[in-house]
Image (tube, rainbow, N blue to C red):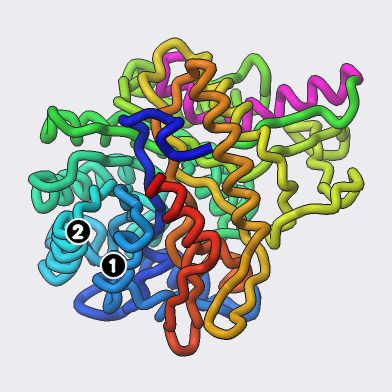
Amino acid sequence: MVSSDFGANFQWGVSSAAFQTEGASTADGRSPSIWDTFTARKGKIKNGDHARTACDFYQRYAGDIDLIQEMNIPNFRFSLSWPRIMPQGTGKVNQQGVDFYNQVIDACLARGITPWITLYHWDLPQVLQDRGGWTNRDVVGWLEDYAACAVTHFGDRVGHWMVLNEPAVFTGAGYFFGVHAPGLTGLRNFFPAAHHATMAMGRVGRVLRSALPQAMVGTTFSCSSVHPLRNRERDVQAAIRADALINRMFIEPILGLGYPVADLKALQGIEAYMQPNDEKELPFAFDFIGLQNYTREVVRHAWIVPYLRARLVPPRNRGIALTTQMGWEVYPQAIYEMISKFSAYTNVPRIYITENGAAFPDEVVNGRVQDPLRQQYLEANLAQVLRARQEGLNVHGYFAWTLTDNFEWAEGYSPRFGLVHVNAETQQRIIKDSGRWYAGFLRS
């Protein structure tokens, strides 16, 4: 398998996110985000980690983009920090924040690297959370204003835009389970947050397309293939419900299919937050969608779990020996299954894999990081992407997660996903063997 097997127009890249890498949390006019607030709360982040410095990308962006170039990676997906560009969430623009992203974009272009921008990768300004955040319907308008600002300043050089990163995760983990920022729980928070996030994709998509008619406009979805534990009706039905929540809840309204209430009755509760004409506003014809897949989920029927009546069965309980640092099963077929699933929608124009990668323990020995498990993971997943490609499925690109070891949300710095090792104390960078492999693969 070589990169040319995927075709001349297949897009290769690497992805990152502002809050996870930039640091400089109070520099040059940036205001706190919900994640700054959340990480300051005791017991919320593993080892008490925070992202005040992170990978110091704010100061070291030029060197990190040099590493992208050294690894022969032609596309760089990164996100903008809303509180760095608009510290009050709306209104006045922070020129120092704009200047930073202008420098990042120009540094990419100077090295022949195409920038792909994600507008929202979870770092909502805290001042907007104080007004309800994603539970407040006004958030859609706030995001439209922020998007218009970004287009004004960067649209002349950026031709690929993504509205949201993984709405299922930031609404589920942040507004239902409370394990991510802003730490809210319950359906009374989840349903409005989920509906407003779904609405935002189409509304902001229209802002981007109107301002940049030649640009490629997309958004990204987390996804995991869902398998029943046993071929028994109760487990099969549990898997259908879990799939509706994990994989279908946010994409299907965008495609004009509505929320998958027929397969998950509990989603009827979202109707309380819908206003007249919402059903007409939800659909939007994106130019592409990004799929972000790492593993599969195996579920069984569970009466004790409210609403979903399903429970995840961890890999260890199924006798699975090989898992990542996140406890996720290594199951490369999952990425093929998800490409197949989303390709089956008739009105998805094209699919990019915008995140895929693995965290394994790394060790620096004599200035080198040998990480064969990560390399094997990437190779095996790419083989499944190639399988999909050769079968004519609708996949047109692959972005590895991630460039550098970084702040992995509630898990802190323990999981290392990077192609580049980062020493959190010295900020020294070392391209791992997996990164060198990816460089050689792309050179092929």
Residue at image position (66%, 42%) is 295
Residue in the foreground of this view, choosing between 82 and 299: 299
Numbered circles on residues, count: 2
Cβ–Cβ under 8 Å for marks 1 and 2? yes
Q: Please, is residue 48 above or below residue 253 in the view? A: below
Observer-nearest residue: 201 or 22?
A: 22
Q: Residue 36 appears at what percent x and percent y?
A: 43, 72
Disc marking residue 111? 2
Image quadrant containing the N terminus: top right
The local crowd at label 1, few if under 14, some if 14 to 19, many if 20 or more residues have their Cα within 10 Å, is: some
For mark 1, what is the residue?
66
Q: Earlier in the sequence, mark 1 or mark 2?
A: 1
Residue 236 in the magenta stretch? The answer is: yes
State which quadrant residue 232 falls in: top right
Query: Is 209 left or right of 184, judged from the image as shown?
Result: left
In this rendering, position of residue 66 left or right of residue 15: left
Q: Magenta residues, as a range?
A: 232-258
**Residue 251 at x, y percent in the picture:** 47, 26
* Crowd band around label 2 with a 10 angstrom C-alpha radius: few (<14), some (14–19), many (20+): some
